[in-house]
Amino acid sequence: MTPDEFRAAGHELIDWIADRRTEVATRRVLPDVQPGDVAARFPNTPPTETASAAEVLGELEELIATGITEVQHPMHFGWFPSNASLSSILGDIASSGLGSLGISWESSPALTEVEEVVVDWMRQLCGLSDNWHGVIQDTASTACLVAMLAARERATDHAQTRGGLRNLPSALCVYTTAEAHSSVRKGALLAGFGADDIRVIDVDPWTRDMLPAHLAEVMQADVTAGHQPAIVVASAGSTGVTAFDPISEIAAIASIHDAWIHVDAAMAGSAMVLPEMRSRFEGIEEADSISWNPHKWFGTILDCSLMYLRDPQHLIRVMSTNPSYLQSTAAGDATQYRDWGVPLGRRFRALKLWYQLRIDGIASIQDRLRRDLENAQWIADEFAALDDWELVAPVRLQTVCIRHNPNDSLSGADLDAHTLRWVRELNSSGRAFLSPSQLDDQWMVRISVGAESTERSHLERLVVLIRGVAEA
Ligand SMILES: Cc1ncc(COP(=O)(O)O)c(C=O)c1O
């Protein structure tokens, strides 16, 4: 493809993207496809003939775009917001268009330095002190794995430089709660911690926040038994019910045992840009690492997960390889982000945040987040006021967890069957999407408010739709 052909095809593609976004609300939220349907639209051998860009765009529209769940839809209330602001998409396109290679400072000085600048702007916007040094990881799962590896090496005085995990004198323990995201357990296992050494700390039965007294007890028992506490992962806004573990109290306990503290604020971290919400994150300065995803509620197109570390030199010692072919004269003065995580090559992800901050501006993002907080509270109040409906968890931010029980007549498997019936009926209608989730082994339904295009009128409509299927 020549640059001129690219220019023409690119204009068409941008027009198509803009049109889709304008019309998003007219489409189904959940696509009308079954497993295998999308793949069956394609030949099972590689194409042997080429196509024009216009033909490919036609196929994109017909074969592919009809098979996506429209998470940019204003009636998308599933999982968590996965906003892809158009400004950040421009940054993503710019990143691809520059085609630069991030394997060292020298391979693209601007890629490294713009990332440093932008993550520091984001630090300031979150009200974090300048003790923190940031990097963009692909996802919060990766950030958690990186924190686990750093914690493992700190707890063992860099055992990797000796026999690794072989012959360690004591078991290394991980502390978290059942509310923590599945990536925490996955990260622990991948980092070499044993399943037997992952401690699930009790939570408050209503808020689901970690109970620090139980953490203290379990850590002490481990030490008495000759084990070594290595890392506590605190959720600041859990996936299920937005639990906020008390970071200050956790830090006071963890520091007695010199355990690493990682704060997983993947979804809720966006709220740190609202000064009035920062009390939810009290104690965060005492952590060793923090991660949160602008690629969720904040609105930066996937993938963009911010990770902040108090002591990046420790991480660099864990991750650094420095092969000769990557050494350069700038080595001593420049940040080498390859030493801050697992991959060598990195994309110019900072451009997505840079575009979004420069074009949308933080004030409009803050206004949108505040709108979503008010909308979540509004819909929570609506359901709380209705007979037969209950809120099964407090509304800490933008997620509202509800359950319907007609005349309080259902329990156990019958209540589950009722909940799953109505939510599946609503989802399969294509008119709205909600994700059910289990709490104490009983299904409930999460209304995760925060799609960029969701206004109060959409929530009003959602109440009608939900009541229509559940109360029928
Ligand atoms: C609290 C929490 N942590 C971690 C994750 C994983 O995020 P990612 O997809 O960026 O790995 C999620 C995803 O929803 C989450 O809600």
Image (cartoon, helix red, strand yellow):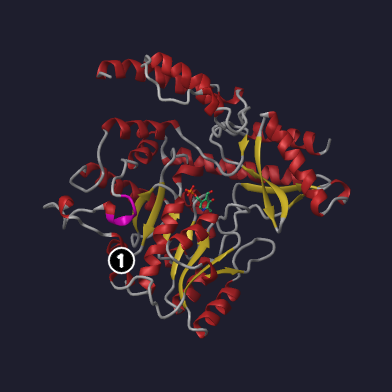
Query: Quick check: is the Cβ at mark 1 less than 8 Å away from ligand 1?
Result: no
The part of the chain drawn in magenta is 339-343
Can you give x and y, in whole percent of width and height, for residue 430 in the image? Answer: 66, 29
- Pick whichever, 132 or 333, lies toward us: 333
Q: Is residue 349 left or right of residue 364?
A: left
- Pick whichever, 160 or 248, lies toward us: 160
The rendered magenta stretch, by its main secondary structure, is classed as loop
Can you give x and y, in whole percent of width and height, for residue 424 in the image? Answer: 71, 37
Within the magenta stretch, is there residue 340? yes
Name which residue lies at 28% across and 52% down: 337
Amino acid under label 1?
A: His
Q: Is residue 277 left or right of residue 305?
A: right
Residue 438 appears in view: yes
Q: Residue furthest front?
A: 45
Residue 127 appears in view: no
Q: Quadrant of the N terminus?
A: top left
Residue 213 figure quarter: bottom right
Can you give x and y, in whole percent of width and height, for residue 257 in the image? Answer: 45, 78
Q: Which residue is mark 1?
A: 314
- Pick whichever, 16 or 416, lies toward us: 416
Name which residue lies at 74% across and 33% down: 465
Q: Quadrant of the C terminus?
A: top right
